[in-house]
Amino acid sequence: MKKRAQIAVIGGTGKVGQHIADQAMQHGYHVRVLVRDPQKLRYQNSKMEVLQGSVENDDILKALLQDCQTVVNAFGQPPKDSPLYSHVTKKVLDVMNELQITRYIGVTGASLTLKNDKKSLINRTGSKLFKAVYADMLEDKQREADLLLRCRDVNWTLIRLPFVKERVNTADVKVDIENTPGLTIGNKDIARFIISQIEGKQYIHQTPFIAN
């Protein structure tokens, strides 16, 4: 039987990150999560190792990624905080290159607009409204995307999300490269899609939108 790889999850106590860790373990992966407060973790078992600390700490980040084959970055922060997304992603990519880890999966918002997008009118309007309210965050998310778009040493996928909903049940996930295929998505469905991409190659070096 093929031995499942070990994955590192950044943002393991977030509303999506916890489901990513749980889904990964259900699929047989060994998981190492980085959290600030371990008491917020809902899922723990023998396949999960918990590291407490900040992703900005170089020693902690190296310990998190050591011996992992895939990194899932679900880092999140309050909207009022100074955005750190591009800073965190650059640190992660630097350590991945140092440790020769090649698979990276990140998440961002559907308001991020890139060169080849063909967003519908309602989605273009929504993106402009989001930019007006959260200008600093969206600018930093753009820097994060630009960083990945220039990166060819890592097999990255940056998944763009609409409004995330807490849902008990799961639903089909729609995927589109050019336009948001829906206004919402369940947190469990995000996790299922991310886990499917650990070994999937369809969206390498791409920024797909997903929705229900």
Image (spheres, rainbow, N blue to C red):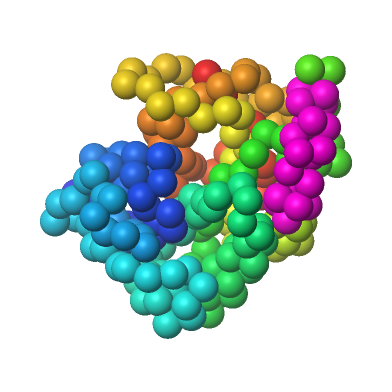
Query: Which residue is pictured at 37% across the width and 63% down the height?
Result: 36
Q: Residue furthest bottom?
A: 59
Front residue (pair 69, 125): 125
| Residue 170 percent across, percent down from the top left | 37, 20
Left or right, 123 with respect to 103, comes to right
Does the magenta-highlighted stretch encompass residue 130?
yes
Report x, y in % for residue 47. 19, 55
- The residue shown at (82%, 26%) is 124
Could you say which is closer to the camera, residue 195 or residue 54?
A: 54
Q: Residue furthest left?
A: 46
x and y, in percent, of residue 188 in the image: 38, 30
Q: Is residue 24 left or right of residue 77?
A: left
- The spot of residue 144 in percent (x, y) is 70, 57
Q: Nearer the viewer, residue 145 or 37?
A: 37
Magenta segment, principal secondary structure? Answer: helix
Residue at the location (76% across, 39% down)?
133
The residue located at (67%, 34%) in the rendering is 110
The part of the chain drawn in magenta is 123-142
